[in-house]
Image (tube, grey):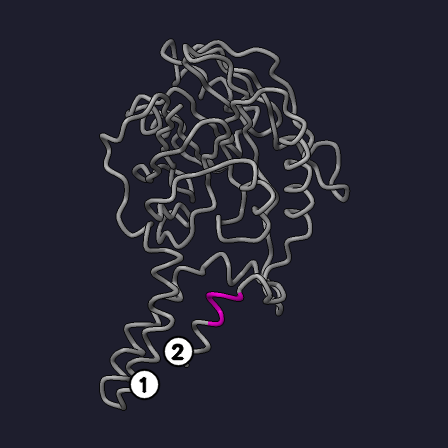
């Protein structure tokens, strides 16, 4: 059994339909205490065998056990949140999102009917904003060149719009800010059906590759974790915090972080979740150093 757990940790990218395994990959660590208890009552060889998955797990996730301190040096703060199109309290949600004073707030599942409510709630502290389709960006700093970002899978209609790009004029220079919401995935007997999400991720990767600005900030519900092979091409271009699990979904019992803040030519030095809102996701806040 220890060898099986170790193999799943090391070879998860080889598992067909592996997005399901990769989404909850850190939770394989829960098997290790059980294996240790069993091994104590067996042979010394069994006890030594359990060290294999333990060492592998610590090598993969050890840096995430202890979150970064709140006073870590940083230059920018960004919040990412899927606010849910069924959120009963948009005003309270905004209050939670801006309580920590972020420079940028990216939101998904914002419907046209509630855009004025959100805009009023963000108020004069965040006068600069753009909403494209069902994603939005609020900023302390002026925004320009705001436009829809085409990450739509070919099988979906033209009314599916879940991406935007804008340029923020910060005191540190221009930053290209992306807000995206990749398609949801579905459970099937082989794992997760992720064809649409993967196609959308490839379009996002192409857009990032063509980005003319060096400094890039990506805020989004990617319906993937950093351990998912789908994000490998994106993570080859962008970085995110290595400390803290910051599980953001589902809000009632967070099991995975599918909400992300990533950056290029900047470093995401910390990430953590904020208190629960009226959404089925938890907000994620990140500190960024230039």
Q: Quadrant of residue 52?
A: bottom left
Kindly tell me whether residue 195 is visible in this rendering.
yes
Residue 234 image point, x, y percent: 58, 40
Q: Circle 2 — which element?
A: helix
Question: Magenta region: which residues?
Answer: 7-11
Q: Classify residue 76 as left or right of residue 134.
A: left
Marks 2 and 1 close (CB-CB < 8 Å): yes
- In what quadrant of the picture does the N terminus appear? bottom left
| Residue 199 falls within the magenta-colored stretch | no
Q: Residue at x 31, y 78 (%)?
A: 35
- What residue is rendered at 68% in x and 52% in y? 195
The residue indicated by pointer 2 is 2
Q: Which mark is on residue 46? A: 1
Whichever of labels 2 and 1 marks the residue nearer the N terminus, that label is 2
Occupied quadrant, residue 97: top left
Q: Is residue 224 above or below residue 146?
A: below
> Is 9 in the magenta?
yes
Residue situated in front as seen by the camera: 13 or 203? 13
Q: Main secondary structure of the magenta part?
A: helix
Q: Element under label 1? A: helix
The x, y position of residue 266, in whole percent, is: 44, 27
Residues 11 and 25: in front is 11
């Amino acid at each position: 059994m220890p060898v099986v757990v170790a193999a799943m940790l090391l070879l998860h990218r080889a598992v067909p339909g592996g997005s399901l395994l990769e989404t909850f990959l850190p939770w394989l660590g829960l098997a290790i205490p059980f294996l240790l208890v069993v091994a104590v009552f067996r042979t010394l060889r069994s006890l030594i065998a359990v060290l294999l998955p333990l060492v592998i797990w610590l090598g993969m996730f050890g840096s995430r056990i202890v979150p970064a301190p709140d006073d870590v040096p940083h230059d920018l703060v960004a919040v990412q949140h899927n606010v849910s199109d069924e959120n009963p309290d948009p005003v309270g949600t905004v209050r939670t999102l801006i309580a920590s004073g972020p420079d940028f707030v990216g939101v998904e599942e914002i419907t046209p009917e509630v855009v004025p409510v959100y805009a009023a709630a963000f108020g004069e502290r965040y006068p600069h904003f753009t909403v494209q389709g069902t994603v939005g960006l609020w900023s302390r700093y002026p925004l320009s060149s705001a436009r829809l970002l085409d990450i739509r899978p070919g099988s979906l209609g033209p009314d599916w719009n879940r991406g935007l790009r804008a340029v923020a004029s910060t005191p540190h220079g221009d930053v290209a800010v992306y807000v995206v919401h990749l398609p949801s995935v579905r459970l099937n007997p082989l794992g997760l059906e992720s064809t649409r999400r993967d196609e959308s991720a490839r379009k996002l990767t192409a857009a990032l590759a063509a980005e003319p600005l060096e400094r890039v900030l990506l805020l989004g519900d990617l319906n993937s974790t950093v351990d998912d092979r789908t994000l490998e091409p994106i993570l080859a271009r962008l970085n995110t915090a290595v400390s803290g699990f910051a599980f953001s979904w589902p809000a009632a019992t967070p099991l995975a972080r599918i909400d992300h803040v990533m950056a290029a030519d900047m470093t995401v030095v910390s990430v953590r979740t904020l208190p629960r809102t009226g959404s089925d996701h938890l907000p994620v806040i990140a500190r960024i150093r230039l």
